[in-house]
Protein backbone atom coordinates (compact mmCIF):
# COMPACT_ATOMS: atom_id res chain seq x y z
CA UNK A 1 0.00 0.00 0.00
CA UNK A 2 1.14 3.58 -0.71
CA UNK A 3 0.48 7.04 0.69
CA UNK A 4 -1.81 7.59 -2.29
CA UNK A 5 -4.02 4.65 -1.24
CA UNK A 6 -4.25 5.97 2.32
CA UNK A 7 -5.00 9.50 1.07
CA UNK A 8 -7.83 8.26 -1.18
CA UNK A 9 -9.47 6.29 1.62
CA UNK A 10 -9.02 9.06 4.20
CA UNK A 11 -10.21 11.80 1.86
CA UNK A 12 -7.15 14.01 2.33
CA UNK A 13 -4.09 14.94 0.26
CA UNK A 14 -0.96 12.81 -0.04
CA UNK A 15 1.01 15.67 1.58
CA UNK A 16 -1.30 15.63 4.63
CA UNK A 17 -0.91 11.85 4.98
CA UNK A 18 2.88 12.11 4.74
CA UNK A 19 3.08 14.88 7.33
CA UNK A 20 0.77 13.06 9.76
CA UNK A 21 2.67 9.79 9.52
CA UNK A 22 5.97 11.65 9.89
CA UNK A 23 4.58 13.38 13.01
CA UNK A 24 5.01 16.89 11.63
CA UNK A 25 4.24 19.10 14.66
CA UNK A 26 3.72 22.18 12.46
CA UNK A 27 0.74 20.59 10.68
CA UNK A 28 -2.60 22.08 11.73
CA UNK A 29 -5.19 19.32 11.31
CA UNK A 30 -8.18 18.10 13.29
CA UNK A 31 -7.53 15.27 15.77
CA UNK A 32 -10.27 13.28 14.05
CA UNK A 33 -8.44 13.54 10.71
CA UNK A 34 -5.10 12.59 12.28
CA UNK A 35 -6.62 9.56 14.00
CA UNK A 36 -8.44 8.49 10.82
CA UNK A 37 -5.23 8.58 8.76
CA UNK A 38 -3.24 6.67 11.39
CA UNK A 39 -6.00 4.05 11.71
CA UNK A 40 -6.18 3.49 7.94
CA UNK A 41 -2.37 3.25 7.73
CA UNK A 42 -2.34 0.62 10.47
CA UNK A 43 -5.16 -1.35 8.84
CA UNK A 44 -3.30 -1.30 5.53
CA UNK A 45 -0.09 -2.34 7.30
CA UNK A 46 1.61 0.60 5.61
CA UNK A 47 5.40 0.61 5.64
CA UNK A 48 7.47 3.42 4.07
CA UNK A 49 8.87 2.43 0.69
CA UNK A 50 12.09 4.39 0.62
CA UNK A 51 14.14 4.72 -2.53
CA UNK A 52 17.76 3.87 -2.42
CA UNK A 53 19.37 7.32 -2.76
CA UNK A 54 21.60 8.02 -5.73
CA UNK A 55 23.40 10.44 -3.43
CA UNK A 56 22.63 12.41 -0.29
CA UNK A 57 22.66 15.70 -2.20
CA UNK A 58 19.73 17.82 -3.38
CA UNK A 59 20.28 20.12 -6.36
CA UNK A 60 18.92 23.67 -6.12
CA UNK A 61 18.52 25.13 -9.61
CA UNK A 62 17.80 28.86 -9.81
CA UNK A 63 16.76 30.68 -12.95
CA UNK A 64 19.07 33.62 -12.13
CA UNK A 65 22.83 33.86 -12.53
CA UNK A 66 24.71 34.33 -9.27
CA UNK A 67 25.24 38.01 -10.10
CA UNK A 68 21.55 38.58 -10.87
CA UNK A 69 20.53 36.86 -7.66
CA UNK A 70 22.64 39.26 -5.56
CA UNK A 71 20.36 42.09 -6.70
CA UNK A 72 17.09 40.26 -6.04
CA UNK A 73 16.40 39.52 -2.35
CA UNK A 74 13.23 37.54 -3.23
CA UNK A 75 15.00 34.70 -5.04
CA UNK A 76 18.13 34.92 -2.90
CA UNK A 77 16.01 34.42 0.23
CA UNK A 78 14.19 31.48 -1.35
CA UNK A 79 17.45 29.70 -2.20
CA UNK A 80 19.07 30.33 1.19
CA UNK A 81 15.89 29.21 2.96
CA UNK A 82 15.80 25.99 0.92
CA UNK A 83 19.46 25.31 1.76
CA UNK A 84 18.76 25.90 5.46
CA UNK A 85 15.74 23.58 5.48
CA UNK A 86 17.60 20.82 3.64
CA UNK A 87 20.46 21.05 6.14
CA UNK A 88 17.93 20.82 8.97
CA UNK A 89 16.54 17.65 7.38
CA UNK A 90 20.04 16.16 7.14
CA UNK A 91 20.71 16.68 3.42
CA UNK A 92 23.49 18.40 1.55
CA UNK A 93 22.67 20.80 -1.26
CA UNK A 94 24.43 22.13 -4.33
CA UNK A 95 23.43 25.40 -6.02
CA UNK A 96 23.21 25.45 -9.82
CA UNK A 97 22.77 28.93 -11.25
CA UNK A 98 21.09 29.94 -14.49
CA UNK A 99 24.30 30.17 -16.49
CA UNK A 100 25.57 26.73 -15.40
CA UNK A 101 24.84 23.35 -17.06
CA UNK A 102 22.00 21.36 -15.49
CA UNK A 103 23.34 17.88 -16.28
CA UNK A 104 24.76 17.49 -12.76
CA UNK A 105 21.22 17.19 -11.36
CA UNK A 106 21.19 13.58 -12.66
CA UNK A 107 23.51 12.67 -9.80
CA UNK A 108 21.33 14.34 -7.17
CA UNK A 109 18.69 12.61 -5.08
CA UNK A 110 16.21 15.28 -6.12
CA UNK A 111 15.91 18.84 -7.42
CA UNK A 112 14.34 22.07 -6.20
CA UNK A 113 14.03 24.62 -9.00
CA UNK A 114 13.51 28.25 -7.97
CA UNK A 115 12.11 30.87 -10.33
CA UNK A 116 10.25 31.22 -13.61
CA UNK A 117 11.06 28.54 -16.19
CA UNK A 118 9.68 27.99 -19.67
CA UNK A 119 7.75 24.81 -20.42
CA UNK A 120 10.79 23.48 -22.28
CA UNK A 121 13.02 24.16 -19.28
CA UNK A 122 10.59 22.52 -16.85
CA UNK A 123 10.32 19.39 -19.00
CA UNK A 124 14.09 19.22 -19.44
CA UNK A 125 14.64 19.39 -15.68
CA UNK A 126 12.00 16.69 -15.19
CA UNK A 127 13.72 14.46 -17.77
CA UNK A 128 17.08 14.95 -16.05
CA UNK A 129 15.64 14.15 -12.63
CA UNK A 130 11.95 13.26 -12.13
CA UNK A 131 12.18 13.98 -8.38
CA UNK A 132 11.49 17.67 -8.94
CA UNK A 133 9.65 20.51 -7.20
CA UNK A 134 9.42 24.08 -8.51
CA UNK A 135 9.15 26.99 -6.07
CA UNK A 136 7.81 30.30 -7.36
CA UNK A 137 5.86 29.21 -10.44
CA UNK A 138 2.77 27.13 -11.18
CA UNK A 139 4.02 24.02 -13.01
CA UNK A 140 1.00 21.73 -12.54
CA UNK A 141 0.18 21.77 -16.25
CA UNK A 142 3.49 19.97 -16.79
CA UNK A 143 2.73 17.46 -14.01
CA UNK A 144 5.40 18.94 -11.76
CA UNK A 145 4.69 19.66 -8.09
CA UNK A 146 5.13 23.27 -7.04
CA UNK A 147 4.83 25.88 -4.30
CA UNK A 148 3.51 29.36 -5.06
CA UNK A 149 2.29 32.40 -3.12
CA UNK A 150 -1.34 33.54 -3.12
CA UNK A 151 -0.76 36.73 -5.09
CA UNK A 152 -4.42 37.15 -6.05
CA UNK A 153 -5.59 37.79 -2.50
CA UNK A 154 -2.63 40.10 -1.85
CA UNK A 155 -3.44 42.22 -4.91
CA UNK A 156 -7.11 42.48 -3.95
CA UNK A 157 -6.24 43.60 -0.42
CA UNK A 158 -3.91 46.31 -1.73
CA UNK A 159 -6.45 47.65 -4.19
CA UNK A 160 -9.28 47.62 -1.66
CA UNK A 161 -7.09 49.47 0.86
CA UNK A 162 -6.44 52.17 -1.74
CA UNK A 163 -10.17 52.45 -2.40
CA UNK A 164 -11.00 52.57 1.32
CA UNK A 165 -8.69 55.59 1.57
CA UNK A 166 -10.45 57.35 -1.35
CA UNK A 167 -7.62 56.57 -3.78
CA UNK A 168 -9.48 55.48 -6.90
CA UNK A 169 -7.02 56.51 -9.62
CA UNK A 170 -4.83 53.44 -9.20
CA UNK A 171 -1.81 52.52 -11.31
CA UNK A 172 0.41 49.44 -11.48
CA UNK A 173 4.12 49.17 -12.29
CA UNK A 174 4.92 45.64 -13.40
CA UNK A 175 7.90 43.93 -15.03
CA UNK A 176 7.07 41.32 -17.66
CA UNK A 177 10.31 39.96 -19.01
CA UNK A 178 11.15 36.62 -20.58
CA UNK A 179 12.39 33.27 -19.37
CA UNK A 180 16.18 32.78 -19.40
CA UNK A 181 16.01 30.69 -22.58
CA UNK A 182 14.03 33.53 -24.25
CA UNK A 183 11.33 31.08 -25.35
CA UNK A 184 8.42 32.50 -23.36
CA UNK A 185 7.20 35.82 -22.05
CA UNK A 186 6.82 35.75 -18.28
CA UNK A 187 3.10 35.86 -17.57
CA UNK A 188 2.39 37.67 -14.29
CA UNK A 189 -1.07 36.87 -12.97
CA UNK A 190 -1.00 39.97 -10.75
CA UNK A 191 -1.77 42.14 -13.78
CA UNK A 192 -4.82 40.00 -14.54
CA UNK A 193 -5.92 40.24 -10.89
CA UNK A 194 -5.43 44.02 -10.95
CA UNK A 195 -7.50 44.43 -14.11
CA UNK A 196 -10.26 42.09 -12.98
CA UNK A 197 -10.69 43.69 -9.56
CA UNK A 198 -10.67 47.30 -10.75
CA UNK A 199 -13.06 46.47 -13.58
CA UNK A 200 -15.43 44.98 -11.03
CA UNK A 201 -15.35 48.38 -9.26
CA UNK A 202 -15.56 50.34 -12.56
CA UNK A 203 -12.17 51.91 -11.80
CA UNK A 204 -9.88 50.31 -14.40
CA UNK A 205 -7.92 52.64 -16.69
CA UNK A 206 -5.74 51.04 -19.34
CA UNK A 207 -3.38 54.04 -19.37
CA UNK A 208 -2.49 53.30 -15.73
CA UNK A 209 -0.73 50.04 -16.59
CA UNK A 210 3.01 50.72 -16.66
CA UNK A 211 4.78 47.63 -18.01
CA UNK A 212 8.56 47.32 -18.22
CA UNK A 213 10.89 44.48 -19.17
CA UNK A 214 13.47 44.50 -16.37
CA UNK A 215 13.46 44.26 -12.58
CA UNK A 216 15.93 46.85 -11.26
CA UNK A 217 15.91 50.13 -9.38
CA UNK A 218 16.86 52.05 -12.53
CA UNK A 219 14.09 50.33 -14.52
CA UNK A 220 11.57 51.35 -11.85
CA UNK A 221 12.74 54.96 -12.06
CA UNK A 222 12.60 55.01 -15.86
CA UNK A 223 9.19 53.34 -15.96
CA UNK A 224 7.61 55.91 -13.65
CA UNK A 225 9.40 58.79 -15.36
CA UNK A 226 7.95 57.74 -18.72
CA UNK A 227 4.46 57.31 -17.24
CA UNK A 228 4.55 60.68 -15.45
CA UNK A 229 5.65 62.54 -18.57
CA UNK A 230 2.80 60.93 -20.49
CA UNK A 231 0.01 61.41 -17.95
CA UNK A 232 1.01 64.62 -16.20
CA UNK A 233 -1.77 65.83 -13.89
CA UNK A 234 -3.70 62.60 -14.56
CA UNK A 235 -0.96 60.46 -13.00
CA UNK A 236 -2.44 58.02 -10.45
CA UNK A 237 -2.78 59.02 -6.79
CA UNK A 238 -2.16 55.38 -5.82
CA UNK A 239 0.50 53.06 -7.21
CA UNK A 240 0.93 49.31 -6.78
CA UNK A 241 4.46 48.16 -7.64
CA UNK A 242 5.12 44.43 -8.08
CA UNK A 243 8.54 44.34 -6.38
CA UNK A 244 10.37 46.30 -3.71
CA UNK A 245 13.29 47.00 -6.04
CA UNK A 246 11.06 48.62 -8.66
CA UNK A 247 9.35 50.61 -5.90
CA UNK A 248 12.71 52.04 -4.78
CA UNK A 249 13.18 53.37 -8.31
CA UNK A 250 9.70 54.90 -8.22
CA UNK A 251 10.50 56.58 -4.89
CA UNK A 252 13.74 57.95 -6.39
CA UNK A 253 11.72 59.64 -9.14
CA UNK A 254 9.12 61.03 -6.74
CA UNK A 255 11.81 62.44 -4.42
CA UNK A 256 13.76 64.00 -7.28
CA UNK A 257 10.62 65.69 -8.60
CA UNK A 258 9.28 66.73 -5.17
CA UNK A 259 6.21 64.53 -5.43
CA UNK A 260 5.15 63.75 -1.86
CA UNK A 261 4.59 60.14 -0.79
CA UNK A 262 1.95 59.30 0.39
CA UNK A 263 0.27 62.71 0.28
CA UNK A 264 0.23 62.94 -3.53
CA UNK A 265 0.89 59.31 -4.43
CA UNK A 266 0.28 56.39 -2.08
CA UNK A 267 2.70 53.53 -2.87
CA UNK A 268 2.48 49.83 -2.03
CA UNK A 269 5.05 47.29 -3.21
CA UNK A 270 5.43 43.51 -3.14
CA UNK A 271 7.82 41.06 -1.36
CA UNK A 272 8.35 42.99 1.92
CA UNK A 273 12.12 42.52 1.85
CA UNK A 274 14.56 44.47 4.03
CA UNK A 275 14.63 47.01 1.20
CA UNK A 276 11.03 47.95 2.02
CA UNK A 277 11.85 48.60 5.69
CA UNK A 278 14.90 50.78 5.00
CA UNK A 279 13.42 52.80 2.12
CA UNK A 280 12.78 56.55 2.53
CA UNK A 281 9.88 56.68 3.17
CA UNK A 282 9.56 53.07 4.36
CA UNK A 283 7.44 51.00 1.99
CA UNK A 284 4.11 49.41 2.67
CA UNK A 285 4.57 45.99 1.08
CA UNK A 286 2.82 42.67 0.55
CA UNK A 287 4.63 40.11 2.68
CA UNK A 288 5.38 36.68 1.20
CA UNK A 289 6.57 34.06 3.69
CA UNK A 290 9.57 32.88 1.67
CA UNK A 291 11.02 30.58 4.37
CA UNK A 292 7.66 28.81 4.58
CA UNK A 293 7.53 28.44 0.78
CA UNK A 294 11.01 26.88 0.88
CA UNK A 295 10.06 24.61 3.79
CA UNK A 296 6.96 23.31 2.00
CA UNK A 297 8.97 22.79 -1.19
CA UNK A 298 11.54 20.69 0.66
CA UNK A 299 8.80 18.67 2.38
CA UNK A 300 7.10 18.05 -0.96
CA UNK A 301 10.36 16.93 -2.58
CA UNK A 302 11.24 14.53 0.24
CA UNK A 303 7.75 13.07 -0.02
CA UNK A 304 8.30 12.45 -3.74
CA UNK A 305 11.67 10.84 -3.04
CA UNK A 306 10.56 8.58 -0.20
CA UNK A 307 7.00 7.72 -1.19
CA UNK A 308 7.06 7.55 -5.00
CA UNK A 309 4.24 10.13 -5.22
CA UNK A 310 2.90 9.97 -8.76
CA UNK A 311 0.38 12.85 -8.65
CA UNK A 312 1.65 16.42 -8.91
CA UNK A 313 0.47 18.82 -6.21
CA UNK A 314 0.45 22.59 -5.75
CA UNK A 315 0.81 24.25 -2.36
CA UNK A 316 -0.26 27.91 -2.12
CA UNK A 317 1.16 30.10 0.66
CA UNK A 318 -0.92 33.06 1.85
CA UNK A 319 0.24 36.69 1.99
CA UNK A 320 -0.28 39.66 4.31
CA UNK A 321 0.42 43.42 4.14
CA UNK A 322 3.08 45.21 6.20
CA UNK A 323 1.85 48.81 6.50
CA UNK A 324 4.48 51.58 6.64
CA UNK A 325 4.98 55.23 5.71
CA UNK A 326 4.45 55.08 1.93
CA UNK A 327 0.68 54.58 2.13
CA UNK A 328 -2.19 56.22 3.99
Image (tube, rainbow, N blue to C red):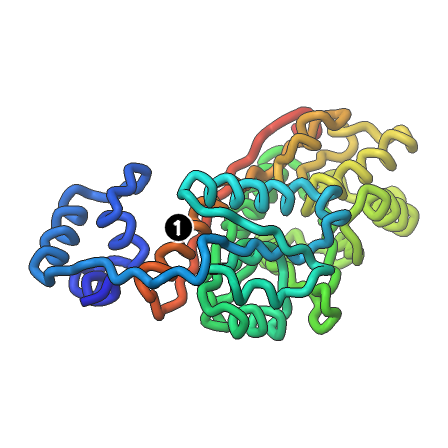
The residue drawn where x is 23% and y is 58% is: 48
Residue 70's image quarter? top right
Q: Which residue is most to the left?
A: 43
Q: Which of the pair 36/201 is nearer the observer?
A: 36
Residue 234 visible in the displayed image: no
Foreground of the two, 247 or 312? 312
Classify residue 213 by image quadrant.
Answer: bottom right
Residue 167's image quarter?
top right
Q: Where is residue 162 in the image (x, y as percent from the top left)?
A: 63, 38
Reply above or below: 62 against 270: below
Percent coordinates x, y for residue 116 in the rendering: 63, 60
Query: From what the image shows, is residue 204 above or below residue 254?
Result: below
Q: Quadrant of the C terminus?
A: top right
User: What x and y, as percent, mark residue 156?
Assistant: 55, 47
Whole-percent x, y for residue 13 in the image: 29, 59
Tell me if I can see residue 312 in this picture: yes
Residue found 64% across the figure and 69% down from its top: 118
Q: Could you tell whether 178 is left or right of 118 in the image?
A: right
* Disc 1 secondary structure class: helix
215 relative to 94 in the view: left or right:
right
> Few, some or many C-alpha atoms within 10 Å of disc 1 (few <14, some 14-19, many ≥20)?
some
Provide the residue designation for mark 1. Answer: 299
Residue nearest the viewer, comparing 314 with 261: 314
Instruction: Write the residue at 43% across / 48% down.
Output: 296
Amino acid sequence: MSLKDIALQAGVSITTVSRILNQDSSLSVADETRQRVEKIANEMNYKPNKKKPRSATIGIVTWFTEEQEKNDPYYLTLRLSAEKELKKQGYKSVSIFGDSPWTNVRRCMGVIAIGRFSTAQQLRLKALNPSLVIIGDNSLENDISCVTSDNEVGVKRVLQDFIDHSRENIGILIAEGRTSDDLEKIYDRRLVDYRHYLRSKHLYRAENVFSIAEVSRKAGYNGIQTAYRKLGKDFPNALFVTSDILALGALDFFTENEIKVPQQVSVVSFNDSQLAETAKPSLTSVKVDLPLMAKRGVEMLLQIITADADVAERTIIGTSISFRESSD
